[in-house]
Structures are given as C-alpha cells and as structure tokens.
Amino acid sequence: MISTSINLWTAPSIDDLARWGAVWYGDRLLHRPWRDLAMAPATRVDEPNVAFYGFGWRLEGDLQWHSGESIGFRDVLLRWPAQRFTVVVQSNRNAPEPFALAQRIAALFKP
C-alpha cells in the first residue's frame, strides 16, 4: 500500500497513486469493514484542521488526510471520499507546507 509518508526516493507515479486511490472505493483489495476501520475516529486531537485521528489518517468532517516528511521532502494527500476527489502534493523542498497548497488546489477543482 502506498502512503504519503513513503520513502520519496521511490516516489509513486500518477498511475500508482490512481491505483492506490481506487482501493478505497471497492472490495478488490481492501474490504469495506477494513476501510471503515481505517477511517474510524479513534483519538480526538487538538490540531488545526483535525478533529480526530484514525488509523494513520487525520479526520475532519468529510476530509480525510495524511502527510509525511523526511529531510528535504514533504507531501500530503487529501481525500473527500463522498465526491471521490483526492489531491496529492509531493515536494522535494522543505517549504512551503504542502497542506495549504493542497487546500488551495482543492478549492479550484473540488466538485
């Protein structure tokens, strides 16, 4: 499974990300009870843009997101499953913060 906190030395292609995204909408690889468990609010957190933390995912209303970073690399994946809409920002720079950029992109294109 590809995560946005993957080792960016082997960054996924757009096709890889599309295949990974499709996993969340069908039972071919990950059955619904497991998907629901991964996105179930498990811990309330006190962070901006986050109400709960699930199984590796930050959950805020209809937004599910995950981020990762390493020295000099940052990335974020934002999902709105009801609209089947995802924004991924991967950067090989430490700045700017990719979450804000992903939100701006979403504002332009989200249904």
Image: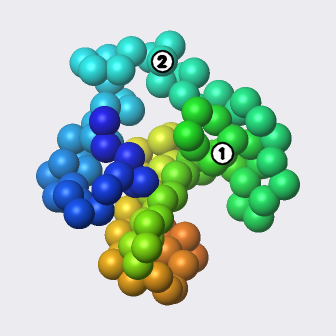
Callout 1 secondary element: strand
Locate residue 41: give its quadrant.
top right
- Residue 87 on image: x %, y %: 41, 61
The amino acid on which the numbered mark 2 sits, given as a three-letter code, is Trp
Q: Which mark is residue 75?
A: none
Density class for disc 1 (Cα within 10 Å; few <14, some 14-19, many ≥20) is: many
Q: Is residue 104 left or right of residue 43?
A: left
Q: Secondary structure at mark 2?
A: helix
Badge 1 is on which residue?
59
| Left or right of 16 in this view: 94 | right
Could you tell me which quadrant the N terminus lies in? top left
Q: Image point 63% across, 47% down: which residue?
A: 58
Q: Is residue 65 left or right of residue 87?
A: right
Residue wearing tag 2? 34
User: On the image, which quarter does residue 39 sit in?
Assistant: top right
Q: Is residue 72 above or below residue 84?
A: below
Q: Position of residue 88 (x, y in %)?
A: 38, 62
Q: In front here: 75 or 19?
A: 75
Name the residue furthest front.
71
Image point 64% across, 35% down: which residue? 54
Q: Residues within 10 Å of mark 2 (few under 14, many from 20)?
A: few
